Amino acid sequence: MAAIGATRRLKWPRVRLSLRTLVMDKQLEATGAVLLADDDSNDVFFLRRAFQKAGFASTVFDVPDGEKAIEYLCGENHFSDRTRYPIPALLMLDLKMPKINGFEVLEWLKTRKELCGLKVVVLSSSGLAADQQKAKDLGAHEYRVKPADLEDMVNMIKEVAGRWLH
């Protein structure tokens, strides 16, 4: 993959600092919401099921690509209602998504001081050490390979949510 900006310029949505963005850390703590950014509807279904089976009462939202993840986090377009779409406390991010991939979302997040309290867990089918290192270098708090069955996914959710959702 070419370096970002070398072959194309990505246009990141701009967010103006306001009173709302200044209190985002408190919102992150208060909502306990989870945002799943994954283009595979089967994975989203099983992740939602795993959260239920693991006993977490967190509200789980999902978006199908990195572009929608950024829109959600910025509160843009139909995500502008923060009562309905609260700032998540945890972002579970797939790497290989259309439009904007997970690495690009991580790069964007590094530029957003108002989202510095957001915990990001990369959840990918790739077990490559290079992908894991790149994700960590870009600010991911944790990297997990997607489990193959529901029981393993429930156990993974218990570990991840237990660590990052308070």
Image (cartoon, rainbow, N blue to C red):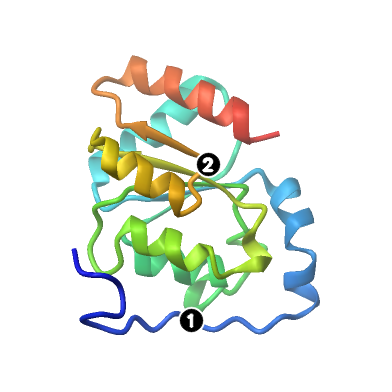
Foreground mark, 1 or 2, reads 2
Q: Nearer the viewer, residue 63 or 11?
A: 11
Q: Secondary structure at mark 1?
A: loop
Residue at label 1? 13
Q: In the figure, 95 relative to 151: above or below?
A: below
Q: Amino acid at mark 1?
A: Pro
Q: Amino acid at mark 2?
A: His
Does the rendering let one see residue 44? Answer: no
Residue 81, image x and y in percent?
61, 71
For the image, the number of numbered tags is: 2
- 10 Å crowding of disc 2: few (<14), some (14-19), many (20+): some
Q: Secondary structure at mark 2?
A: loop
Where the N terminus falls, by quadrant?
Answer: bottom left
Residue 136, image x and y in percent?
44, 45
Q: Which mark is residue 147?
A: none
Q: Left or right? Give the position of 99 relative to 31.
A: left
Q: Residue at x 47, y 72 (%)?
A: 71
Q: Residue at x 57, y 44 (%)?
A: 59
Q: Residue at x 56, y 30 (%)?
A: 161
Mark 1–mark 2 contact, CB under 8 Å? no
Q: CA distance from mark 1 to mark 2?
A: 23 Å
Where the C terminus falls, by quadrant?
Answer: top right
Please report whichever mark, 1 or 2, sits nearer to the chain's N-terminal start.
Answer: 1
Residue 19, image x and y in percent?
81, 76
Residue at label 2? 141
Q: Left or right? Give the position of 115 relative to 8.
A: right
